[in-house]
Amino acid sequence: MKVVSQIKEPIEYEMELFEEKFLKSMSSKVALFNRITYYIVNRKGKQMRPMFVFLTAKLINGGKVNDRTYCGASIIELIHTASLVHDDVVDDSHKRRGFFSINALWKNKIAVLVGDFLFSKGVLVALENKDYDLLHIISNAVRDMSEGELLQIEKARLLDITEDIYYEIIRQKTATLVAACCSMGACSVKPDSEDVETFRKFGELCGMAFQIKDDLFDYGAEKIGKPTGIDIKEQKMTLPLIYTLNQSDKEKKRWLINSIKKHNKDKKRVKEVIAYVKEKGGLGYAVTKMLSFKDEALTLLENYPDSEYKSALTLMVNYVVERKK
């Protein structure tokens, strides 16, 4: 958490003010909604996404943000929170960041409604402030996220994911929201500048690196307090596995696909798959690709003058690939 505090330092004031505004944007006339949103706010994560919004805005605008920046950060956090609530229902997951999920405490029906409520709040924040350009950015991101999830489900049935399809899935599922954060930050202060596209690309590259890092956790690359092999059990084709399949002969390929399709609940077999992926260099290959996305993101920052915001964003990109959970 020390690194996160360092990243937050140049935007400490903005983040505090944002928390107040964000809490206000979640309020409802229905007491049950307020009880649930209070539960959500008190169990929030590191808030990396609003941090991306503020750091980007301050970097390209001489250290200044405006009301639109706060609006953008609120939209992002509302939509992101809504997607997490819905994800837990879709995945039938009862824990989120070590706490009970909304569906575990209040059941699926209420969780879906809470997710819908938060989505609508995100849209309303933009409309009330007439920030149609920010609404456009987030609408594109939500569309991509839904398509990415469906593409992954479609491909998981056949296990025919190529490396290119894998990149498309993670670009849509994960990277698109980080891209929206950064383009939102740029758009809030310099709406028609080239910076909006530059930082969209920057965010996308960070998001790609972030997801590959998550894939590596599944192979026990770090001790993160959750069992390894979850992706294999859920028949998710991740980069280490895709690379390994491409490096295997027909017999081993058949064994791998059979393991994932029919023996994915067998702990011994899952361990054997993990060992084989490591042996074939699947992890090393994924690490190389992750670092390549990271370096590309850092290259985009080189054109901007040095500042505490640039340093914080550089730290953020490195944190994405070095984090332990």
Image: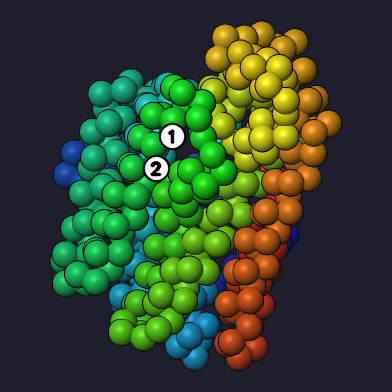
Apparent side of residue 149 relative to residue 209 in the rendered image (left or right): left
Please name the amino acid that badge 1 sits on. Answer: Gln
What quarter of the picture does the C terminus occupy? Answer: top right
| Mark-to-mark CA distance, 2 and 1 | 6 Å
Q: Which residue is mark 2?
A: 148
Residue 173 sits above or below residue 127 on the image: above
Q: Nearer the viewer, residue 74 or 228?
A: 228
Discs 2, 1 touching: Cβ within 8 Å = yes
Q: Is residue 211 visible?
A: yes
Quarter of the image where one finds residue 104: top left
Provide residue 98's location: percent of width, then percent of height. 58, 32
Quarter of the image where one finds residue 181: bottom left
Q: Residue furthest right?
A: 279
Pointer 1: residues within 10 angstroms few (<14), some, or many (20+)? many
> Which residue shows up at 59% across the image and 87% down it?
303
Q: Nearer the viewer, residue 208 or 311?
A: 208
Provide residue 210's location: percent of width, then percent of height. 60, 52
Quarter of the image where one finds residue 196: bottom left
> Which residue shows up at 59% across the image and 28% down it?
231
Residue 231 sits above or below residue 315 on the image: above
Provide residue 306's location: percent of width, then percent of height. 65, 88
Pointer 2: residues within 10 angstroms few (<14), some, or many (20+)? many
What quarter of the picture does the N terminus occupy? Answer: bottom right
Residue 112 sits above or below residue 45 on the image: above
Provide residue 114's location: percent of width, then percent of height. 27, 36
Q: Which residue is mark 1?
A: 152
